[in-house]
Image (spheres, rainbow, N blue to C red):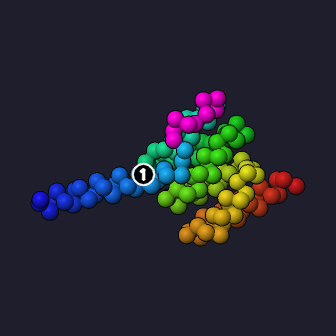
Amino acid sequence: MQRETKVYIFTLFLIIMTTASLHAKLTPKDDIPKDMPAVVKTQVERFYATDNNERIAAAKQLKELGDEALTAVPYLIMMLDDENMIVRREIVYTLRALKAVSALKPLKEVMENDPVDAVKRAARMAIDAINEAEK
């Protein structure tokens, strides 16, 4: 087998494995509730995209929807494990904006364990904001 062919096969393998691991924590797309508001469901479905910018845009759009997006919180929590730090940070911003109390424990885990300081700081600020909103 020629070297170029081996490199191509290896690259293809890496792409497949990266894509598979990217969505490992998300439930199957077919399991998204049918009764979820259509505008929210459309954004949640974008979390399955391989393009980081698509996932970031989905999180931003959910943040803009406000309370209407609360049904997406379980999916936002799953996305805290995204491979891309900008996606994770945007997810944290969205959970903060939604004042998602159910995200407090996962946000604490992010604050303690995320490898990126900017994401940790965002998680700490989100926790503070959610706790303040609960008072």
Out of 29 and 112, give the one closest to the viewer: 29
Q: Secondary structure at mark 1?
A: helix
Residue beneath the point at 66% across and 46% down: 73
Please provide percent x and percent y for residue 111: 66, 66
Out of 130 and 78, give the one closest to the viewer: 78
Position of residue 86 relative to residue 27, above or below, is: below
Please provide percent x and percent y for residue 87: 54, 55
Quadrant (top left/top right/bottom left/bottom right) for the N terminus: bottom left
Which span of residues is magenta-colored? 28-36
Residue 48 magenta-drawn? no
Question: Main SS of the magenta segment?
Answer: loop
Residue behind mark 1: 20
Tell me the quarter of the picture where residue 72 sits. Answer: top right
Residue beneath the point at 28% across and 58% down: 11
Out of 130 and 72, give the one closest to the viewer: 72
Please provide percent x and percent y for residue 109: 66, 64
Quadrant (top left/top right/bottom left/bottom right) for the C terminus: bottom right
Residue beneath the point at 65% across and 54% down: 93
Position of residue 30 relative to residue 26, above or below, is: above
